[in-house]
Image (cartoon, rainbow, N blue to C red):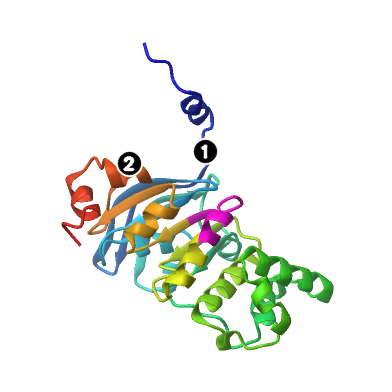
Amino acid sequence: MTLPTREAKKDSQEEKTVKFDIQDVDLYYGDFQALYNNNLEIHEKEVTAFIGPSGSGKSTLLKTLNRMNDLVDSCRVEGLIELDGEDIYSDKYNVNELRKNVGMVFQQPNPFPKSIYDNIAYGPRTHGIKDSAELDHIVEDSLKKAAIWDEVKDYLDRNALSVSGGQQQRVCIARALAVEPNVLLMDEPTSALDPVSTSKIEDLIEELKEDYTIVIVTHNMQQASRISDKTAYFLSGELIEVGPTEQIFTNPQHEETENYVSGRFG
């Protein structure tokens, strides 16, 4: 009989906490159904990558996690999505608190047309923080967490739109971190960036997962394989397969997944 290795024992003992529990989720835009019966657990302090061809539903599901789809009048979500055991689509759930706890970084860098300082301080100010010393600390801490403090510390009053695209995206990440979320959602955060900036964002994601749960949508399968702990493959609104990233890319259990990760489809 083969005894389990020390690493295998350690893995079996360290059960990851479920952050998001997604059960039987369907999503409709009017009469059009965009998601079909999605079931998925997202674990705390891991990077989970959503992959799949365009129109597969990965960004749509991502946006359900902080109710960004509420902004679309015709959108209807059925099923259950729990964050830390609470139904985020319950009438009693505070949507503003949800969006504070679940930050969002978009495909195109979208800093406000304000100074770098005011971009980072915006969220804390809206949540009632007015003390200048406290705001100074939050701005510095957030920019350090986003690995851009050393690049911008001497010109925090500069318009955030005047820095490079890669720097803008890290300013946006710092802005999301400034309100102390537990989760970061990233919708193709490097697709508009050059390879050097992409590498910096990937390194940053590796660091951030020590403290945050991260869900990233990416078309870049090499990126998913480099930075994610788990990968979920979507096709035509359905979750086809989810598992440890190495397994998804080397030993997928479904033919559709194998065709996609091998480049024979999509």
* 225 horizontally vs 102: left or right: left
Tell me, yes or no, if residue 70 can be seen here. no
Depth check: 27 or 17 in front?
A: 17
Q: Position of residue 39 (x, y in %)?
A: 35, 46
In the rendered image, which quarter is residue 149 located in? bottom right
Q: Position of residue 25 (x, y in %)?
A: 35, 52
Above or below 113: residue 119? above
146 magenta-colored:
no
- Circle on res. 247: 2
* 54 horizontally vs 182: left or right: left
Residue furthest front as drawn: 196
- Circle on res. 16: 1
Q: Residues within 10 Å of mark 2 (few under 14, many from 20)?
A: few
Depth check: 225 or 55 in front?
A: 225
Q: Residue at x 55, y 46 (%)?
A: 84
The mark nearer the N terminus, 2 or 1, is: 1
Badge 2 element: helix
**Which amino acid does the dot numbered 1 rest on?**
Lys
**Which amino acid does the dot numbered 2 rest on?**
Gln
Depth check: 144 or 70 in front?
A: 144
Magenta stretch in the rendered image = 203-214
* 240 horizontally vs 139: left or right: left
Q: Position of residue 131 (x, y in %)?
A: 82, 74
Q: Residue at x 34, y 50 (%)?
A: 232
Q: Are marks 2 and 1 in contact (CB under 8 Å)?
A: no
Badge 1 element: loop
Residue furthest top as drawn: 1
Image quarter where the N terminus lies is top left
Q: Residue at x 36, y 64 (%)?
A: 59
Tell me, yes or no, if residue 63 can be seen here. yes
* 4 horizontally vs 164: left or right: left
